Amino acid sequence: MAIQEEDIKRKFKEISKMEHPKTNTFKNCIYAFIIGGLICDVGQLVNNIVISLGVEKIEAASWTSIIMVFLGALLTGIGVYDKIANFAGAGTVVPITGFANSIVSPAIEFKKEGFIFGVGAKMFTIAGPVLVYGISSSFIVGIIYYILFSLNVIK
């Protein structure tokens, strides 16, 4: 019985290897790096334009984030961001536009279920954990910073 089980496992591994799609990790990393970099270049361009319009540098960073989230959501809504993501993979996930995509995509997918149980309930299925852990870790780091600052460890 054990020999037959071993034979089945071996055959399963062989079939899995044949059916598993071949990926070119190096090529995918290059695409992710280039497209992610281009998204960051667009963000820098937006930042430079906002600053050239007379907005202070600190406030321009907020405006840049808002505009980039809007662009990510817009491109997701018209179906362009998904095509870019299929090409670039992780290069589109890391910038802030990927966050916008992670919120808008489920909202579009579940809109037929209504605004409450579809869009409202499903909108944060992907981005929810990011928000929870991001806010939690920011809170913890803030407390540590406050304690160290209070003890004059950092200035």
Image: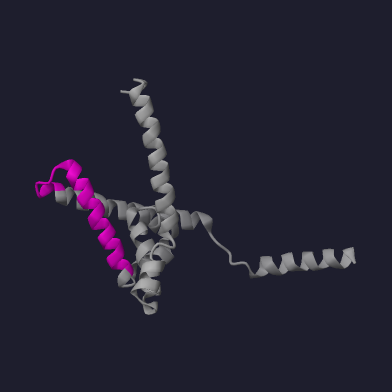
Q: Residue furthest top?
A: 152
Task: Name the main secondary structure of what is drawn in magenta.
Answer: helix
Quadrant of the rendered image containing residue 120: bottom left
Residue 145 percent coordinates (x, y): 36, 31
Q: Is residue 67 magenta?
A: yes
Question: Residue placed at 38% from the left, 41% from the top?
Answer: 138
Q: Residue furthest front?
A: 116
The magenta stretch spans which residues? 51-76
Q: Please state if 14 lies on the left or on the right of 135 as rendered.
A: right
Quadrant of the rendered image containing residue 57: top left
Taking 93 as reference, is 20 above or below it?
A: below
Q: Residue furthest left?
A: 54
Question: Residue placed at 33% from the left, 60% from the top?
Answer: 100
One can see residue 83 in this view: no
Question: Residue placed at 41% from the left, 58% from the top?
Answer: 127
Identify which residue, 13 or 130, lies in the foreground.
Answer: 130
Query: The N terminus appears in which quarter of the rendering?
Result: bottom right
Taking 45 as reference, is 104 above or below it?
A: below
Taking 100 as reference, is 132 above or below it?
A: above
Q: Please state if 34 lies on the left or on the right of 57 as rendered.
A: right
Question: Residue placed at 30% from the left, 67% from the top?
Answer: 75
Residue 60 percent coordinates (x, y): 18, 47
